[in-house]
Image: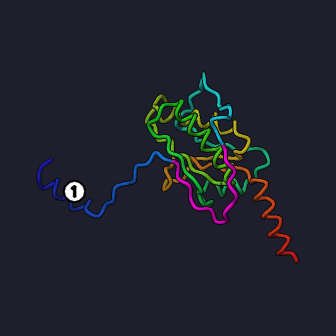
Amino acid sequence: MNPDDKSLFLDAMEDVQPLRRCTDVHWQPAATPRTRQPVDTSQLDNFLTTGFLDVLPLAEPLAFQREGVQQGVFDKLRSGKYPREASLTLLRQPVEQCRQQLFTFICLAERDGLRNLIIIHGKGRDDKSHANIVRSYLARWLPEFEAVQAFTVAQPHHGGSGACYVALRKSSEAKLETRERLAKRSR
């Protein structure tokens, strides 16, 4: 690259901010605070399967919709219209570590009554890439949680094919809150 090209490039990029790199779980503040019960996930049996894996082709999008989930709810999830309450990043981590982190993440989200999550797994350039292996395991693992009602590929501004939205079922506490709110409205 000659000095003029480098100067032009640096001028064009001067207002660009680097993306944050994070491998942590991020919890968004709850709109209505709920009582938190302690959950010791080390005492729980991680039931997520391992072993032989059918690798999903890159062209096949991640998608799952449990029976009983309304199509409108799934469409709204797919279009990214639900606020994401927590995120998990699984980039460049061994599969077993991803398995453990996903198990803990979903258990904690369920405990906290969260409904809408995003999981960043990365984009693979070919079917055998690490990111696509993790993505394929996610397609197997997420339906193994009874709490997971649906998941789908994220919108491009949330990571596109390198991330997925996950919808968890409503907790009994949240169902009760909704019933009470609707009962007050109908009086």
- x%, y% of residue 173? 77, 57
Q: Secondary structure at mark 1?
A: helix
Q: Which segment did they paint magenta?
A: 25-39
At horizontal 83% and vertical 74% (from top left) the residue drawn is: 184
> Is 118 left, or right, of 22 in this rendering?
right
For the residue pair 52 and 44, the one nearer the viewer reads as: 44
At horizontal 74% and vertical 41% (from top left) the residue drawn is: 146
- x%, y% of residue 147? 72, 45
- x%, y% of residue 36? 68, 54
> Is 126 left, or right, of 116 in this rendering?
left
Give the residue type at disc 1: Phe
Which image quarter: residue 100?
top right
For the residue pair 55 and 146, the one nearer the viewer reads as: 146
Q: Residue furthest right?
A: 187
28 in magenta: yes
Residue position for label 1: 9
Crowd band around label 1 with a 10 angstrom C-alpha radius: few (<14), some (14–19), many (20+) = few
Total residue callouts: 1
Q: Residue furthest bottom?
A: 187
29 in magenta: yes
For the residue pair 159 and 83, the one nearer the viewer reads as: 83
Which image quarter: residue 28?
bottom right
- x%, y% of residue 144? 69, 36
User: Does 72 appear above or below 21?
Assistant: below
> Is 169 left, or right, of 128 in this rendering?
right
Q: Residue furthest left?
A: 3
Magenta residues, dominant SS class: loop
